[in-house]
Image (cartoon, helix red, strand yellow):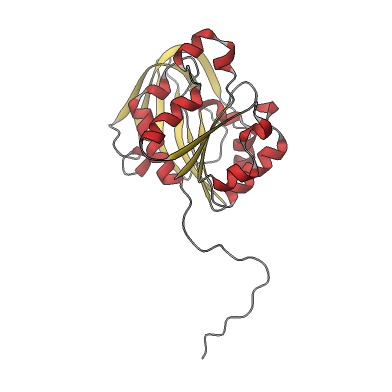
């Protein structure tokens, strides 16, 4: 399918240590295994014209993956409107890690999407709480990440349609780390791990989740609903 991976691409250019972890950028680390799985993957970054998310690009995109952190406010409202409209029209959206605070995700959720956090390189266990869900296919009882940023409850999001992963951290916090939503005709998946300082997107289980997620989020091939005034349907004949 046609996939677009969007990334701010700021940390990798400002920090030598982060550039060593993701020399091609977080977007390329995410895109590489998806390309290897046979998908047509395009990448886009914040500093490109229109942030790389032109109407033409989005019209071709079946699933969009979004990573952002330090520059949420720099994303133009016009582009946010464009992305949200495409989600409501059926494009899948996968929001990663600190993308919880993106304008796009907050608009679609209708809440602050705020949370607790701590950067201490703690161990994270992502427990599979819905082993029947297709996004969890091929994953064991949990995914272990040796070092990650802590996110803790309360996470100010709407009650998820489906909860797939719950994280636990060394400090004792827990977090709803894999949540799905339907918005209009589109499907949205929020997946928590992915702090820029750690090689999370090189982890094979994380890559497997993202490969499963793009399959789940792909647009449904169904008739476009019709709205507005409707004629009376006479079934008496």
Residue 152 visible in rendering: no
Quarter of image, res 38: top left
Q: Residue at x 59, y 25 (%)?
A: 8
Residue 224 left/right relative to 1: right
Q: How many marks?
A: 0
Along the viewing direction, whichever of 175 and 83 lies nearer the viewer: 83
Q: Residue at x 62, y 44 (%)?
A: 84
| Image quadrant occupied by the N terminus | top left
Residue 44 left/right relative to 82: left
234 versus 147 height, above or below: below
Residue 44 left/right relative to 73: left
User: Residue 3 at x, y = what percent?
Assistant: 49, 40
User: Residue 170 at x, y = what percent?
Assistant: 40, 15
Q: Residue at x 61, y 42 (%)?
A: 108
User: Residue 16 at x, y = what percent?
Assistant: 52, 8
Along the viewing direction, whichever of 159 and 232 lies nearer the viewer: 232
Quarter of image, res 140: top left
Residue 233 visible in rendering: yes
59 versus 230 height, above or below: above
User: Residue 95 at x, y = what percent?
Assistant: 52, 34
Residue extending farthest to the top is 16
């Amino acid at each position: 399918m046609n996939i677009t991976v969007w990334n701010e691409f700021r940390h990798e250019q400002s920090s030598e240590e982060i550039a060593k972890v993701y020399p091609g950028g977080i977007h390329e680390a995410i895109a590489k295994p998806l390309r290897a799985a046979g998908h047509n993957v395009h990448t886009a970054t914040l500093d490109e014209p229109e942030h790389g998310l032109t109407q033409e690009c989005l019209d071709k995109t079946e699933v969009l993956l979004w990573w952002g952190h330090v520059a949420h406010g720099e994303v133009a409202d016009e582009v946010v409107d464009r992305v949200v409209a495409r989600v409501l029209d059926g494009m899948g959206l996968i929001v990663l890690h600190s993308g919880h605070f993106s304008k796009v995700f907050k608009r679609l959720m209708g809440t602050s999407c705020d949370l607790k956090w701590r950067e201490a390189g703690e161990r994270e266990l992502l427990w599979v709480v819905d082993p029947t869900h297709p996004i969890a296919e091929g994953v064991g009882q949990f995914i272990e990440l040796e070092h990650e940023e802590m996110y803790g409850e309360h996470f100010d999001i709407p009650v998820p349609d489906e909860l797939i992963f719950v994280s636990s951290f060394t400090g004792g916090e827990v977090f709803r780390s894999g949540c799905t939503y339907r918005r209009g005709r589109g499907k949205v998946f929020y997946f928590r791990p992915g702090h820029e300082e750690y090689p999370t997107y090189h982890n094979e289980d994380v890559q497997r989740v993202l490969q499963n997620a793009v399959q789940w989020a792909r647009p449904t091939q169904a008739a476009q609903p019709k709205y507005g005034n409707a004629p009376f349907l006479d079934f008496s004949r």
